[in-house]
Each structure stands twice: as structure tokens, then as C-alpha cells.
Amino acid sequence: MTRIVTYVEMTDRSQLVPGAAVPGMALVTADRDLALIAELMARIGAPYQWRSARRSPQEWEEWFAEHPDRTCCLLTVADEPVGVVCYDLRAGGDVEIRTFGLLPEFTGRGLGGHALTLAIRRGWELVPGVRRVWLHTSSADNPNALPNYHRRGFDTFKTEEDDG
């Protein structure tokens, strides 16, 4: 099945349009806790057939090793994990939000706008000199993902077809 992959970017932190605040929601660095991140990403990705839903422990180790500066954070509400954000630092001051997602039992509850706001803010703060925060999504992801990205101020810079 052909998917449409959409790449979005924010080239200035002033483009961020914050989502409605969610009391008790926080973004907490996960200290590369491989087991926890792997479990949460598998649960987040399962409904959308993400590769993370079927990686072996060895593949998880390789995933972390491919970008030694990869940073993962937990989205929490009242200290309960509700989602994950992972970032890759790229050349030229680019920060890619490699993974962003909420656990299935927390989607549709009005958390996504604020969760993405926290993720974007952290992306701009990861290292000095960030020039761009970007990510990609596909038509196979949650149907609310792309509209949320656009509402938060991301602009589409590329689309492509992917046969999965």
C-alpha cells in the first residue's frame, strides 16, 4: 500500500503556536532507558505498523547506536508515561523529532497539542544554535498527526510516496 510521507519544519522558534496546556503534563529525559523506550514505542507504533512495534532487542541496540546523540524523553501526566519523543541532532543546526507519539489509550483525550508544544520547545533547546526543528509523518499514522503539526506552526517542505 502506498503511503504519503509528509515532511514538516519550523525554522524559527517564534513559529510555535502552543497547544492548550494540560495540567500535570511534563517532558522528562529518559536517560536512554532502552527497555522502557522500546516498550513504549512498540505500544505507540503498533496501531500504525511502525517498525518500532516489531524490533528485536538487538535491533533496538542498533537503533540507539546509529545516532549516539539520540535523546529520548517521556511525556508524562502526573508522572505516568503517556508518550515518547526522540530527537536526532543533524548537521547544520537541525534537530529531527525522530519519534513523537502517545500511547493508544491516551490518544483522543486532548493531550496531543500540548505534548507537541513541549516536544518542539525542547527541540529548540537541545543544543545551542538550532536553526530548524523538523519531522516527518505518513498517511498511515494517526490521522490527527499532520493537522496537529500544522496547528503548532510547522510548514510542509516536502511530500513523497512510499511503498512501505
Image (cartoon, rainbow, N blue to C red):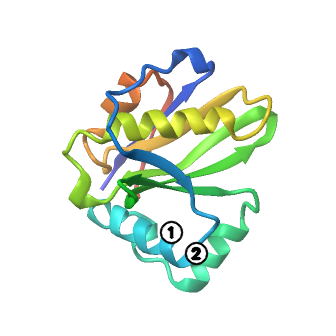
Q: Is residue 30 above or below residue 5?
A: below
Q: What is the number of callouts on the image?
A: 2
Identify which amino acid the numbered label 2 is placed on: Leu
Q: Tell me the number on the disc at residue 85.
A: none
Q: Is residue 70 above or below residue 37?
A: above
In the picture, residue 6 is in which quadrant? Answer: top left
Tell me the distance, in whole angstroms, between the alpha carbons under discs 1 and 2: 5 Å
Residue depicted at x 40% and y 63%: 50
Q: Secondary structure at mark 2?
A: helix
Q: Give whichever of 109, 47 is nearer the camera.
A: 109
Q: Position of residue 104 (x, y in %)?
A: 25, 59
In the rendered structure, the answer to whether residue 77 lies left or right of residue 107 reads right
In the rendered structure, the answer to whether residue 54 lies left or right of residue 59 reads left
Residue depicted at x 79% and y 28%: 129
In the rendered structure, the answer to whether residue 115 lies left or right of residue 74 reads left
Q: Give whichever of 139, 70 is nearer the camera.
A: 70
Q: Are circles 1 and 2 on residues that touch, CB within 8 Å? A: yes
Mark 2: few/some/many CA within 10 Å (<14, 14-19, 20+)? some
Q: Residue furthest top?
A: 14
Q: Position of residue 22 (x, y in %)?
A: 32, 37
Residue depicted at x 64% and y 77%: 61
Residue depicted at x 52% and y 78%: 35
Q: Position of residue 142 (x, y in %)?
A: 28, 47
Q: Is residue 156 above or below residue 134?
A: above
Mark 1: few/some/many CA within 10 Å (<14, 14-19, 20+)? many
In the picture, residue 13 is in which quadrant? Answer: top right
In the picture of the structure, the residue carrying the numbered disc 2 is 34
Q: Residue furthest left?
A: 108
In the picture of the structure, the residue carrying the numbered disc 1 is 37
Identify which amino acid the numbered label 1 is placed on: Ile
